[in-house]
Image (tube, coloured by chain):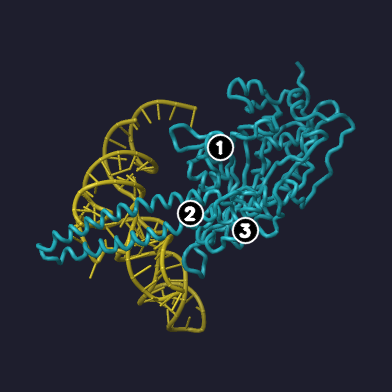
Amino acid sequence: MLDANFIRDNIDAVKANCANRNVKADVDAVVTHDSERKRLQKQSDETKAKQNEISKKFQSAKPEERAALKDESAKLKEQVGILDGQMKMAEDQLRISLLPIPNMTHPDAPVGHDAAANKVVYRHKEPTQFPFKAKDHVELVESLDLADFEAGVKVTGSKFYFLKNEAVLLELALVQYAIQKLVAKGFTPIITPDLAKVDVLEGIGFSPRDNAETRQIYTIADTDLCLIATAEITLGGMHRDEILDEAKLPMKYVGLSHCFRTEAGAAGRDTRGIYRVHQFTKVEMFVYCTPEQSEAIHQDIRKIEEEIFEGLGLPFHVIDTCTGDLGGPAYRKYDLEAWMPGRGKDGEYGEVTSTSNCTDYQSRRLNIRYRPSGQKGTKFVYTLNGTAVACTRAIIAILENYQQEDGSVLVPEALRPWIGKDKIERKSK
RNA sequence: GGAGAGGUGGCAGAGUGGUUGAAUGCGCUAGUCUCGAAAACUGGUUAGCCGGAAACGGCUACGAGGGUUCGAAUCCCUCCCUCUCCGCCA
């Protein structure tokens, strides 16, 4: 979330930013509720100060004066009760009005209302051409016996799947490949919980309290827990309410988790196969750093993502995401889209990774700070995240780009050490 | 799950109803000394909110939430978490 004082001082810029990002939010309400909160706080503080004075006087007071002091204090106490109740309400309203307001935007991010305004900033390889009719990943998965969608439906529901055979090895290989690369680059490997508390989700920028029709998050009945949609949530929550040592920044993590998404509102979109599913495995980068470090680190993360997909030998391009497509917490976002020959009519690019600089939008809510040397007080750290590998999407790109005319699929060289073969072939019955 | 102990500042650790937001030590930091360093000595060093240009002032916070009291880190209740022992278990 943004700082209410910042909004007050930059109200026009915040409103313009909301418009650019296609977000309808009542910015004026923030100022109204914040003013109300301040007014009540001042009143409450003053009343409490009087109360404190009375209790100081009490000891030196003569016994016959004490009854009067008690009386006065009781009255003040009643007032404080009322004021604090009102203040709590004002704080809640302030919080609620602050939640939908998106982060500010990097001045270089392309302005536009939808994906059409996204800007391609990097390309690797041309889209794969086949001298035969290419299959999509669903056909490949079925003919090579790599997943069981019917079992997924029977056991859990639609958009759940069982991975089988080499698909399992592929997933594990991708995890190894990504984590090893990142450990070599100084990232600390972490396996995070797959569940997290509601307020951590909110701090990262998710809305698990939305009503069931629009909620993107699975919640666990009778608890304040949710299934995480990404390890960004748990990695970002890991240091909440801490003051980090400036000398240790940037702190770089690579986390492995399952990710769960309800995909509410996505009904009918990307229904085939494993492109849009309710559960998948993902290796995620997460960095805590100072404001000064953040832009360079954002570029570093983008480079790492490019390196990972170059290493897999896949054609892709990278997009500088436009304002309308940024999502709430991102100040700037790059998406890496891999070529998927089976997507759409004759192949399309499909999103495989995404990296965001979230500035202090998440850390303010999660209360993660550092002490800048030479300055007094604390500042909020900046947080960045980026996908290393989202297994299902990467598997689609590999199967579709590495397919051969005979229906087999070559294994990318980088993954062969973990798969133990260089080709996935039809099983003999 | 059962029994016991405990949760205080960056860390360690005092504090059982009133100048305790918090002794002391460590750490960090500035200075003195020194050619320089170490040691020693001296000073500074919790965070948040509100008001203020600032100096500064007020309020809040000793795991969380309630309660008792004129007054709570200190007493009472509920919950959470940690540690030790026992049980169960991948």
Kind of element beneath mark 1: loop
Relative to residue A37, is residue A134 drawn left or right?
right
Mark 3 touches mark 2? (CB < 8 Å): no
Q: Earlier in the sequence, mark 2 or mark 1?
A: 1
Q: CA distance from mark 3 to mark 2?
A: 18 Å
Rendered residue at 78%/34% (across/down)? A344
**Percent position of residue A419, x then y:** 71, 33
Does residue A115 lie above or below A171 as drawn?
A: below
Rendered residue at 51%/48% (across/down)? A203
View extreme (left): residue:
A64
> Same chain for the residues at labels 2 and 1, yes or no?
yes
Q: Residue A186 got which mark? A: none
Is residue A401 at all visible to an observer of this figure?
Answer: no
Relative to residue B16, is residue A202 drawn left or right?
right
Foreground residue among A337 and A143: A337
- Label 2, on which residue? A367
Q: Earlier in the sequence, mark 3 or mark 2?
A: 3
Q: Chain of mark 2?
A: A
**Percent position of residue A8, x then y:** 52, 61
- Label 3, on which residue? A294
In this structure image, what is the colour of chain A?
Answer: cyan
Q: Earlier in the sequence, mark 1 or mark 3?
A: 1
Query: How dense is the environment of label 1, judged by Cα within 10 Å: few (below 14), some, or many (20 and up)?
Result: some
Rendered residue at 67%/41% (across/down)? A389
Q: Amino acid at mark 2?
A: Asn
- Label 1, on which residue? A215
Give residue B71's quadrant in the image.
Answer: bottom left
